Each structure stands twice: as C-alpha cells, then as structure tokens.
Amino acid sequence: MSKEIKSVIIYSRINDESVVFTLIDLVNFLVEQKINVIIEQSTNDKLRLSMPTLKFADMKDQADLMIIVGGDGSMISAGRKIAMVGVPVLGINRGHLGFLTDLAPKDIRKALYSILKGEYVLEERFLLSTTIKGPKCQHALALNEAVIHGVKTAHMIDFSIFVNNKFMYSQKADGLIVSTPTGSTAYNLSAGGPIIEPSLNVLSLVPMFPHSMNLRPCILSGDSSIKICFRSRITPEEITVSCDGQIIMTADDRCEICIEKNEVPIKICHPHTYDYFKVLRSKLGFGSKLVD
C-alpha cells in the first residue's frame, strides 16, 4: 500500500463540453470523499468553481496528486510543468488514444476510490532537457521527444552528432528524433524506432529519411549527452527544434543543439492493476494478427 491521497490538484485544458462534465463529476466525487480539492488557475478561469486555485509555479508541497482530465497532449503539457514541483500525475482520458491517461471517465469513481486509499503505483519517467547554444540561448523540456527538422518540405539538412563529446556520425537527412522511452510509442514509433519499456534508462536516436542505406535507429544510454552541429549554411528560418510537438524553437548554423536527460523526472500515478504491455495491446494493437 502506498500513501493515502488527502489533497488533489485538478488540471484540464477544457476543449469541449464532455471534459466539463467529467471535471464536475470528478470534483463532486473528491468532495464526497473529503479530499482537499485545488483547481489549477487557468483551468478554473474556464470552469469558474468556488474553490481554491493555484498556478503551476506555486504547487510544490501543496498536494499529494494532480489529476489531469484530457488527452495525451494535456498530460504531456502539464507533465513538463509539474515535474519541476514534484507532484505525481494521474490521467483521465478525454482525448483520442489516451496512451498516457490510464482512467476512462466511466471508471472514475471505482478506480479513484482505490487510488485514494493508497492502492496505486508511482512510476518515474525522465524528460529531455534541450538547449540551443548560439546567438540566442533557448531551452525547453520534452517528455516524449525533441525533433530537429527542416522547415521546408523535402529539404535535407546536413549535420553531425556527438555523444559525450565523441564524434558519432555526419549525415544528410530530413531531421533527427531524440526520444525518451515514454516517447518511443509516439513520433519515434511512426519513424521506425523501437518500442522501449518505460523504466529503461535509454534514449532512442532515429534519423528522419536519411540519404543513406546504412543508417538505422540507435539506442544510447539515458545518461548520454548529445550534441548536434550543422555542417552547411543555415538561416534561422530553415531549422526548427520541436519539443513534444508543442514547443517550437529555431536554430541556424551558428548553433549547437545539446540534448540530455533532465535532472528531475515526472512521477506518474497508475492504478495498482496497471500493465504496460496490456496498454500496448489495447491502445496500439501490439501483437495483433492482421488476418485470422
């Protein structure tokens, strides 16, 4: 048994009416269970409940759990912020795939009752810290992946990769995906990268459409420091660095892109029945027969 949950922060981007219904049901249930409920400030700006509110920056030591109502995008967006204050997160799926959001709306009361009593597991997932060093220093975190790619369609970029300050290779390609185990089932998977069990301390490097027949995805230690340098003239309008597809930064040939594991992980709360491989089968059809 884990620690009982006494205080909960609720977050949602509230993009449709069904999310509001789920939020109201969630709040009512938590109040019934005598849980201290706090609403994230931007969430309550839309929900307008007479309850305590907090900004992300003020959440440290203020709650035992954050519950996120939405899809994987909401989970990823909130996860980057909440990781830095150390509050575990639990997802209720109101999106499409719901790979990171464990609970279905219809299961809220039954599943949450057990979780509040301490029947849950906490799993740490690491994030990527991406820094662009150049005329203008830029920095962002990513839970899934950092992607370096050209802005122009079907336009290759010429770059070199260094791992722990040792030359790895140079390549012309549409770009490069650096993925965490959490992100291995996202863009990494679509680009031909491997599925990685989330507890592993590794990174996946996947070149995007490389102009080479002998370049394949590569697994590195999660403690590796990766540096990408450009080998040809590039203007800021030609290269973007995307973190989780939500934060967009620009770079040029004067820049070095440095990617490494963030020091602070995110803590994800799962029901005690959580099974990663069951999620792979049910959400992604992993191992399913194409024909009977």
Image: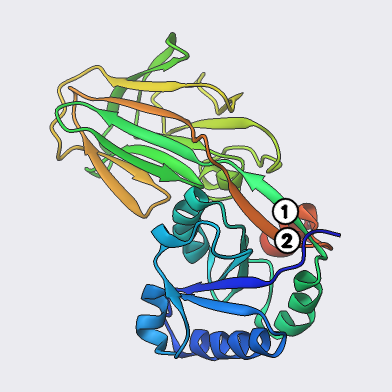
The C terminus lies in which quarter of the figure? Answer: bottom right
Q: Is residue 171 above or below residue 144?
A: above
Disc 2 and disc 1 in contact, CB within 8 angstroms: yes
**Closer to the camera in the image, 252 or 136:** 136
Q: Quadrant of residue 99?
A: bottom right
Q: Residue at x 37, y 19 (%)?
A: 171
Image x and y of residue 24, in percent: 55, 90
Looking at numbered disc 1 in the image, what kind of residue is underneath it?
Leu
Q: Residue at x 86, y 60 (%)?
A: 1
* Pointer 1 local density, CA inside 10 Å: few below 14, some 14–19, many at least 20: some
Is 13 positioned to the left or the right of 69 in the image? left
Tag 2: amino acid: His
For the rendered model, the colour scheme is rainbow
Mark in front: 2 vs 1: 1
Counting the numbered discs, the total is 2
Return the mark for residue 289.
none
Q: Residue at x 36, y 74 (%)?
A: 42
Residue ID for mark 1: 122
Q: Residue at x 43, y 80 (%)?
A: 14
166 is higher (above) or lower (below) than 72 = above
**Location of residue 152 by image quarter:** top left
For label 2, the SS is strand
Please state if 31 lies on the left or on the right of 238 as rendered: right
Q: Is residue 69 visible?
A: no
The percent coordinates of residue 30 (x first, y second) are 66, 83
Distance between the Cα atoms at labels 2 and 1? Answer: 6 Å
